[in-house]
Amino acid sequence: MPNIVEIAVSDDRFSTLVTAVQVAGLVEALQSPGPFTVFAPLNSAFEKLPPGTITSLVQNPPQLGRILTYHVVSGKYTKADLEKLSELTSLEGTTIRLNFKKNEVKNATAVLTDIEATNGIIHVIDNVILMGP
Amino acid sequence: MTQTLEAPKTKIPPSTHPLAEIIYRLEAGGTMLPDTPENLMQIIGLYKAYAVPMDFYWRDLLYIAEQVFLNPLPWSKYFISDEYLDRENKYSGDNADLRIWRGCGDAHPELREFMAQGELKKNLPNILHHLWHDRINMEFAEECMRSMLWHRDMYKPWNQFDGFLDTDEYKQNCDRVIKAYFKGNPAMLGLYKLFPDMFYEQCRQMSYYSNLGLFWEVMAPVFFEMSDLYDEGKMTSVPAAMDFLVNGIFAIAGRPIYHHVYIKGECFEIIPKSKGFTWLYEAALPYVEAVFYRTAPFRGTKSYNAQAGQVPDSQPDFHYGVLYADKFPVGTAGIPPTFLAQDMLHFLPDYLVEYYKQHCRGEGDTIVQLAVSFQRSMYCVTSAVIQALRAALLYPLDDEDPEHLMANRQFFEAQMDRFLRPEARIRDIQSQEYR
């Protein structure tokens, strides 16, 4: 079974995410045993951000890394697990609001869930989520 | 002119909030300020008049944070070096990381002209302009910085800059810089040994100098570009102005916030960029909270009796910012808003000079009128912040799900709750007669 990074690299719908993870220097961390739960934004999610946002973040890897680690949680949480929770603490340090009965992660929708990896699990979301209440 | 909006025919019931009309306007993609050509002219004119002194503020804030630093007698801190006047703004000029304003990257030509000639319109040595107080009022910028420092703990846990200032890592970084800065000065090093916390607190203040300087470095080109677009007839409504600000907020959200100090040319990182602190979470949101909403009761505007409960016990309840301020007392007691108003008076576009003359109540009235226009313009900026937060954390305005629309509604209502206190000027700015 492939790990989280290998799954993302093999799927063209995550090419922006893969580039961002590489720029932020997070590849090694996401290849470690974990386990992790990753809320992975599609390319179309990044395209919804206003012009300049990605450029500005790519120029500043530590800041980009902070946004990306907000999409990662320590531990392996399946869709069934997430349905029982109202929030989780991200690796960034602040919490992510959940309403998984409606497949919602903050203001994003999980369009594909429970993609198993050797070091965790991926849920695909349609928006980049940002820190905040 | 007051705009009246009916409850939108959406899937959620009408709001019962006292400011429901303004909430409907926000839900329709508008701002707290009515969309009229007169309002647009006032806010854009003030953005331009604000951007020129702001071009000095951010440069001098960084000059103080990076070069003056802990100088115990900083008499020359307002005499900014050529290096900082020539310093390329990261968001304007040919070498910009992300070009927001099409103009130059170094100090604005109108700023340079004013610094050379002042109100006197005479090329005198800087020291004479300074002593005559014929200069940019940097005290305003410092008051904003102090407000951010004093209202610490804002936006925790999302704002991580503030918490970092209390960590051992920060103190160790300070220790290294303090020892390098005062090398060969046994008196100051002795004082540091006796009172280390006093020195750390001074460093925290310097870190906020840097924070605010980096924040305003972005805002100056944003305002210059808005002014140019308006002059070209390409910015035609108040919501369009707000949308420009919202896009700017997102574009620059990830800009690093850091604090570097230069000692004899060597760079010391008190707060390195690698901490991941960002413009949005660590500078913009705390700035809006501290300066637009809270600040502190300024001397000279009104006497407050804290023992009689006229000043809130809790800092989050402070309400002395620009959104609540009585703009009439400008011109008294050298209060910070007056400093800013006087700075902006020097750079008003011609169309606003003419406009204020039409409604003039007598000599000196222009400064009051421009302060009211400034208040309108800051309600537009605050609207942009509210809409940006809604877009970042909640749902699109045209979302089909009633639960999402209700979440947006509750967010807007919670924001409007802050303007229910009688000091808020939100009701005043609905009318053009408030001037």
Image (cartoon, coloured by chain):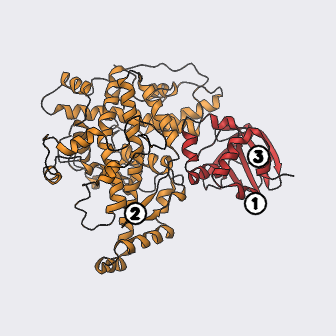
- Provide the residue designation for mark 1: A32
Element type where label 2 sits in the image: strand
Q: Is residue B428 visible?
A: no
Distance in Å between CA atoms under marks 2 and 3:
41 Å
Q: Which residue is mark 2?
A: B261
* Display colour for chain B: orange
Do callouts 1 and 2 mark residues in contact (Cβ within 8 Å)? no
Question: Neighbour class for label 2 at 10 Å: few (<14), some, many (≥20)?
Answer: many
Residue in view at x 23 percent, y 31 percent: B369
Picture quadrant where residue B406 is located: top right
Q: CA distance from mark 1 to mark 2?
A: 37 Å
Callout 3 amino acid: Val
> In x, y percent, where is residue A123?
75, 44
Q: Position of residue B387 (x, y in %)?
A: 50, 34
Residue under numbered circle 3: A9
Q: From mark 1 to mark 3, how far is it between C-alphas?
A: 16 Å
Residue A1 x, y percent position in the rendering? 87, 52
